[in-house]
Amino acid sequence: MNVNGNISDISHIFVGHACGSLSGSVVGGFLFDCMNHNLILGLSTLGTAIALYLIPFCKKAILLVVMMAVSGICTGILGTCGNVLILNIWRGEAAPHLQALHFTFALGAFLAPILAKLALGSAVPSENHMIADMSNHSELTLPPAADLDIIFGVPANKNLLWAYVVIGTYTLVMFAFFIVLFFKKTPYREKTKKAAQIRTAKYQDILLVLLFVFFFFYTGAEMAYSSYIFSFATLHVGMSESQAAGLNSAFWGSFATCRGMAICFVTFLQPGTMIVVNNVGSLISSLLLVIFDKNHICLWVATTVYGASVATTFPSGISWIEQYMTIKGKSAALFVVGAAMGQMVFPVVVGYLQGNYPHLPGIPYVSLGSAIVMGVLFPIMYKLATAPLNSKIQVSRKSEDQKALLSTSRFNNEDEDDYGEEGAEEEWDKVDFEMIEMMRNSVIETSRKLLRKSPTEISNQLWSNDTPFSSSLVITGNSPGKPLPLDKEKND
């Protein structure tokens, strides 16, 4: 109503937002590896807030599509960089934090429409009010100077304006927090890695491609189910609109609840285990929908189970692959791009099936097919991730481990960026060789002395306080090749 367009015109905003999200995911993956993390997240949040402020002022559908695309670019960057930032900060303990991040997505999607309706009232104006606003608008647009208002102007319904202003202001507060973190310059950057275990999978590129396909089917099926379950329930199953609305709420309610519970589950369940459980739940619920597609009770149960099953797959997948390879911005961008493409393709497929074959249960078929593909892909990915490394990769991995261990002893003296790979290997070899040589010589010398003495002398010497037995080894990180002094006590 705000842009005076029909449903066909408005449908382009979803395509614009999806394209923007796709582009933002790619751009965010590259920017994350070369910019300050807090700065890029802050600027993306600022762009999202500005887009939210301007969206209700759009009076043309094309301008609304552009603003939604800008919003999609910013949220795409946030989605990619936010996941990788959590992995960089918490490393091996990132699983509950990833689940908490994605839980806030589900919680916001579930609560925001309810809170907006309660606090702001209905955004749909009455017919008489709409006619009066249109007549007043026609009078105001007579002068040529008012042509700009046709493209960009205050919406007729102020509740619509205030809804976006409140959300935009909330986002602007988040921008302020990121800027504070940027100027604070917390030195968590490479220093937090310390002697973290180097994770190297043998087939990294193949794993990334398979994860791209995995997230494509997962996110596409999730988006298609949540978008079309209302129309499927009313048109195919024969539910009333109120029952179908409750069914949609049941899906998002179980989705948000399981994401919240997963914050605790990941403390004693491995990410791979959670993915297997989710795949089994998706497969069973989809199969029930295909077999009993007209049964109301089965639809309620299957929808609730399906919402719970797909809730934690995305964060669990990121936590799982982090166990076998280090995830950077470009890798995370590939995952998010696959998810964004699934969101674009699957709703179109389901819409085509429901429009041309209304007698067939389109949504259960798509959900079942996606569950089967995911169930086949994950064992293959697990087999590739746990494949044994060849000797060349093991040598390289050992060299990186040695470099990490040596660099931790030098954190207080110099930056690890100045610590080259060749120098690290050399220093490791020197320290290792000198330690072994010193210990070998010490053992040999002690054995020779003991062999020259009688048992009585050995016993007396061990119990004597006059024997210098205190020594300390000093190995400095800056000069591992220096002699190792022995400090002896004087007992005159």
Image (cartoon, helix red, strand yellow):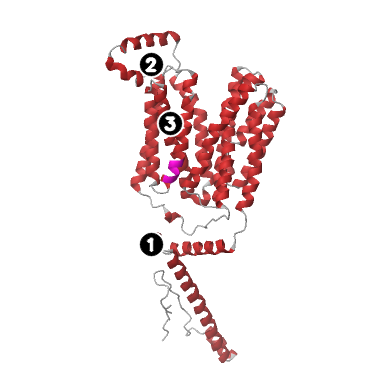
Residue under numbered circle 2: 156
**Residue at figure coordinates x 51%, y 32% from the top left:** 107
Per the model, the C-alpha gap separating discs 1 and 3 is 42 Å
Residue 167, compared with residue 269, is above or below; it is above
Element marked by disc 3: helix
Across and down, in percent, residue 475 comes to 43, 72
Q: CA distance from mark 2 to mark 1?
A: 61 Å
**Residue topped by disc 3:** 69
Q: Looking at the picture, tell me which residue is in the foreground, 275 or 374.
A: 374
Classify residue 106 as left or right of residue 478: right
| Label 1 or label 3, whichever comes before in sequence order | 3
User: What amino acid type should be assigned to the residue bearing mark 1?
Assistant: Asp
Q: Position of residue 63 (x, y in %)?
A: 39, 25
Name the secondary structure under disc 2: loop
Give the magenta range: 26-30
Q: Nearer the viewer, mark 3 or mark 2?
A: 3
Along the viewing direction, whichever of 440 and 427 lies nearer the viewer:
427
Q: Is residue 145 left or right of residue 483?
A: left
Magenta-span inclusion, residue 390: no
**Mark sitting earlier along the chain (2/1):** 2
Tag 1's secondary structure? helix
As drawn, the residue found furthest toward the right would be 291
The amino acid at mark 2 is Ala
Q: Is residue 22 above or below residue 240?
A: below
Mark 3: which amino acid? Ala
Q: Residue at x 42, y 75 (%)?
A: 481
Q: Position of residue 17 (x, y in %)?
A: 46, 31
Q: In this figure, which residue is indicated by the disc labeled 1? A: 418
In what quadrant of the picture does the C terminus appear? bottom left
Residue 328: % across, % down = 48, 49
